[in-house]
């Protein structure tokens, strides 16, 4: 059993999930009449949006620049020098 790892579909959907939670909380912040709850939902919503965007951008940057990630799935004998 591998510790500390999520299944790939769950891992890949986390940024979208965080952003969605952020949107829901921002929507709730407009619905609440109590200033405390409205403010809490607004802050939570903004944090969800920022977290989702930051994770998505970090993964995109890593995948675009990491040589290890770009080589994934290629065989050891498959290199650019043999072509």
Image (cartoon, helix red, strand yellow):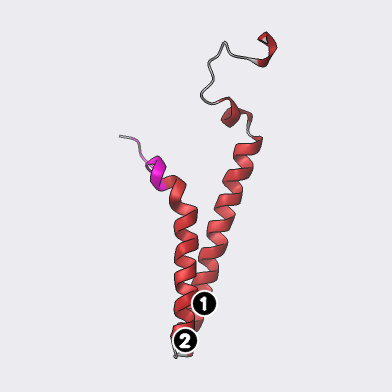
Q: Nearer the viewer, residue 67 or 9?
A: 9
Secondary structure at numbered mark 2: helix
Drawn side of residue 56 relative to residue 37, left or right: right
Q: Residue furthest front?
A: 83
Which of the 4 image quarters holds residue 2? Answer: top left
From the viewer's perspective, tell me whether residue 16 is left or right of residue 58: left
Above or below for 82 versus 43: above
Pointer 1 residue: 42
Figure quadrant of the C terminus = top right
Say which of marks 1 and 2 sits in front. Answer: 1
Task: State the image coordinates of residue 51 (x, y, percent, origin top left).
Answer: 54, 59
Magenta span has 40?
no
- Disc with the residue nearer the chain's start (1 vs 2): 2
| Point 53% across, 67% down: residue | 47
Mark 2 is surrounded, within 10 Å at the Cα level, by few (under 14), some (14 to 19) or many (20 or more) other residues, namely few
Q: State the count of labels.
A: 2
Magenta-highlighted stretch: main secondary structure? loop
Give me the residue at 49% from left, 71% from top.
44
Q: Residue at x 40, y 44 (%)?
A: 9
Res 47 visible: yes
User: Tag 1: Cα neighbours inside 10 Å, few (<14), some, or many (≥20)?
Assistant: many
Above or below residue 5? Residue 20 is below
- Which labelled disc corresponds to residue 6? none
Q: Which mark is residue 36?
A: 2
Q: Residue furthest left?
A: 1
Q: Position of residue 1 (x, y in %)?
A: 30, 34
Q: State the SS at label 1.
A: helix
Q: Residue at x 52, y 77 (%)?
A: 42
Spatial CA span between label 1 and label 2: 10 Å
Which stretch did the figure color magenta? 2-10
Left or right, residue 8 beside residue 72: left
Depth check: give the residue in front, 23 or 36. 23
């Amino acid at each position: 059993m591998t510790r500390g790892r999520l299944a790939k579909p769950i891992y890949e959907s986390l940024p979208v999930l965080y952003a969605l939670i952020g949107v829901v909380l921002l929507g709730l912040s407009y619905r609440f009449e109590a200033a405390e709850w409205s403010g809490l939902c607004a802050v939570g919503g903004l944090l969800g949006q920022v977290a989702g965007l930051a994770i998505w951008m970090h993964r995109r940057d890593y995948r675009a620049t990491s040589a290890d990630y770009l080589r994934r799935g290629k065989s050891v004998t498959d290199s650019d020098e043999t072509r």
